[in-house]
């Protein structure tokens, strides 16, 4: 059955209607799949020698998070180089990038019919549409001319969407967009389509082109360093250095020298002049990670540099002018640190001109599966596998877990699972299943039921001379259950002792209030 004029008109109307890019691309693929009667389709954007999925239909949801590097995927490389419709023969020896990634076909799938449509705008490759089917003759009734027409419509839609995105970025970034160094954009990609991440991305686009100091807040493992890199790469300082300093790893004895430098003979061991991080970052950006760990004496000296733009090297009486943008990050509640006298209020206000909160992974609905696809594809490349997929059960478990360690924990869990899956594979094709995770399925269940089982423990709590004694823990549990049971009972006791005031309880337990709320939610207290 050939493509009718009505089919082409419907496709054109679908992708030019007043929808968001995501909805428009999804509708395009849905229409393509219905019209061509294919079993799977994908719309891909080409950038930086790789294809990035924009929309998929009939494929595992984690495909959206994967990044297909041309050198790793011969079929996609052939599509990129062809400049015209590519029909792969049913017996093609080139591995299909989607093998193992079509639901319910994992172990016995052989994609017989495969067509690639390169998308070109102004003579340059901007993307591709891939169409797959199980029947080797599935697309024989469609002529190359008809498929070229479909390709032209998809090219126009993608080109318009990319142009609109570019104009929107320029509108909120700089009045001198030519000053940006966009060549490095592909080196940093923040993956996420959840409302929380879209809101954060909007804030990044607003602040990146300014010279405002930025304070990045978020739990451990949320990706604060990645956010800092993104801000720098989209700033007017992108062609200048981004200098990193972990304040938590700074011994106080050398911290001042690390920040401001020293002259020869300033102290024992100073055998030569040395530039500090501020001098190295001149005209660029200095990223101060774990800023909440900076010692108080250094905080006052840092404040002076922020206020006046000059510094003194250790052992020198000369001032040195520097022009540095500060991006700081912390997993601490700096307001509470100020109240506790551990952080200077004036420095806090200098740093937090534009605060950005990186949401925890358990508040990023839908992003776990995108990130999983990204990490699994990266593991596939490193392990030299032809195909590495995830079973539906493993995807379900990943989606239901609370991820207290955030994105970092997800990456480590999947990296370990990929290694175990390869070890058990009989070929260069492997699948990650729940048994490959370093946690058990019962950990994904509602923690409230566990707390209920051990509620009787609370009767044994007692107070002596105003101090709480640790609650007993029921035997017969594994270590994770025992730990969470202890946490639940101890927090309940502390909460009761503080009049059910969560803020006061957080202070009593020396915890960030946001972290306490998330912990309480995870172990079933909220």
Image (tube, rainbow, N blue to C red):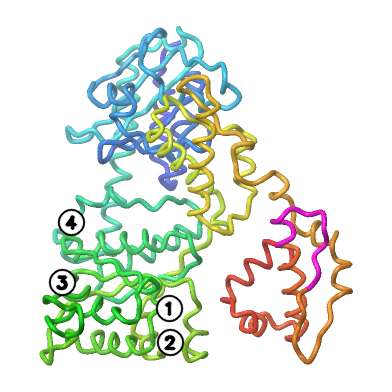
Question: What separation in Å lies between label 2 and label 1 (alpha carbons)?
Answer: 7 Å
Alpha carbons under labels 3 and 2: distance apart: 27 Å
Packing grade of label 1 (10 A; few <14, some 14-19, many >=20) is many
Whether label 3 touches label 1, CB < 8 Å = no
- The residue indicated by pointer 3 is 283
Q: CA distance from mark 4 to mark 1?
A: 31 Å
The stretch drawn in magenta includes residue 473 = yes
Q: Is residue 141 magenta?
A: no
Q: Secondary structure at mark 2?
A: loop
- Quadrant position of residue 65: top left
Question: Circle 1 — which element?
Answer: helix
The mark found on residue 292 in the picture is: 1
- Which quadrant would the C terminus be assigned to in this image? bottom right
Sequence-wise first label, 3 or 2: 3
What's the residue at 43%, 87% (across, down)? 343
Give yes or no for contact between labels 2 and 1 (Cβ–Cβ under 8 Å): yes
Q: Which residues are magenta?
A: 471-483
Answer left or right for 406 relative to 177.
right
């Amino acid at each position: 059955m050939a493509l009718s004029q009505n089919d082409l008109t419907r496709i054109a109307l679908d992708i030019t209607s007043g929808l968001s890019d995501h909805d428009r691309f999804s509708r395009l693929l849905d229409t393509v799949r219905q019209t061509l009667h294919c079993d799977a389709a994908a719309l891909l954007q080409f950038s930086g020698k790789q294809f990035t999925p924009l929309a998929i239909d009939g494929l595992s949801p984690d495909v959206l998070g994967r990044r297909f590097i041309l050198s790793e995927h011969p079929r996609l490389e052939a599509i990129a180089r062809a400049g015209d419709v590519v029909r792969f023969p049913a017996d093609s020896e080139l591995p299909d990038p989607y093998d193992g990634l079509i639901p319910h076909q994992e172990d016995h799938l052989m994609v017989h019919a495969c067509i690639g449509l390169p998308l070109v705008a102004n003579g340059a490759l901007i993307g591709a549409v891939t169409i797959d089917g199980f029947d080797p003759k599935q697309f024989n009734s469609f002529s190359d001319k008809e498929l070229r027409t479909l390709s032209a419509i998809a090219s126009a839609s993608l080109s318009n969407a990319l142009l609109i995105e570019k104009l929107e970025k320029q509108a909120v970034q700089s009045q001198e967009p030519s000053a940006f160094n966009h060549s490095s954009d592909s080196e940093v990609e923040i993956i996420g389509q959840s409302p929380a991440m879209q809101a954060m991305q909007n804030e990044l686009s607003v602040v990146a082109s300014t010279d405002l100091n930025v304070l990045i807040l978020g739990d451990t493992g949320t990706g604060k360093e990645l956010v800092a890199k993104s801000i720098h790469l989209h700033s007017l300082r992108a062609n200048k250095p981004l200098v990193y300093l972990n304040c938590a790893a700074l011994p106080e004895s050398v911290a001042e020298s690390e920040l401001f430098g020293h002259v020869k003979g300033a102290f024992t061991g100073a055998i030569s002049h040395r530039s500090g991080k501020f001098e190295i970052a001149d005209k660029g950006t200095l990223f101060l990670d774990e800023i909440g760990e900076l010692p108080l004496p250094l905080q006052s000296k840092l404040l002076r540099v922020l206020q006046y733009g000059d510094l003194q090297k250790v052992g020198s009486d000369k001032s040195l002018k520097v022009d540095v943008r500060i991006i700081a990050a912390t997993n601490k509640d700096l307001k509470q640190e100020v109240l506790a006298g551990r952080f200077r209020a004036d420095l806090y206000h200098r740093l937090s001109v534009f605060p950005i909160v990186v949401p925890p992974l358990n508040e990023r609905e839908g992003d776990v599966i995108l990130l999983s696809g990204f990490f699994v594809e990266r593991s596939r490349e490193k392990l030299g596998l032809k195909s590495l997929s995830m079973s539906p059960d493993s995807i379900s478990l990943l989606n239901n877990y609370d991820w207290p360690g955030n994105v970092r924990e997800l990456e480590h869990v999947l990296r370990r699972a990929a290694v175990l899956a390869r070890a058990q594979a009989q070929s260069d094709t492997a699948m990650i299943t729940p048994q490959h995770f370093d946690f058990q399925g019962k950990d994904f269940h509602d923690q409230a039921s566990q707390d209920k089982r051990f509620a009787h423990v609370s009767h044994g709590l007692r107070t002596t001379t105003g101090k709480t004694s640790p609650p007993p823990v029921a035997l017969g549990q594994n270590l994770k259950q025992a730990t969470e049971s202890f946490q639940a009972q101890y927090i309940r006791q502390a909460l009761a002792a503080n009049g059910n005031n969560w803020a006061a309880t957080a202070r009593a337990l020396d915890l960030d209030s946001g972290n306490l709320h998330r912990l309480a939610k995870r172990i079933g207290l909220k």
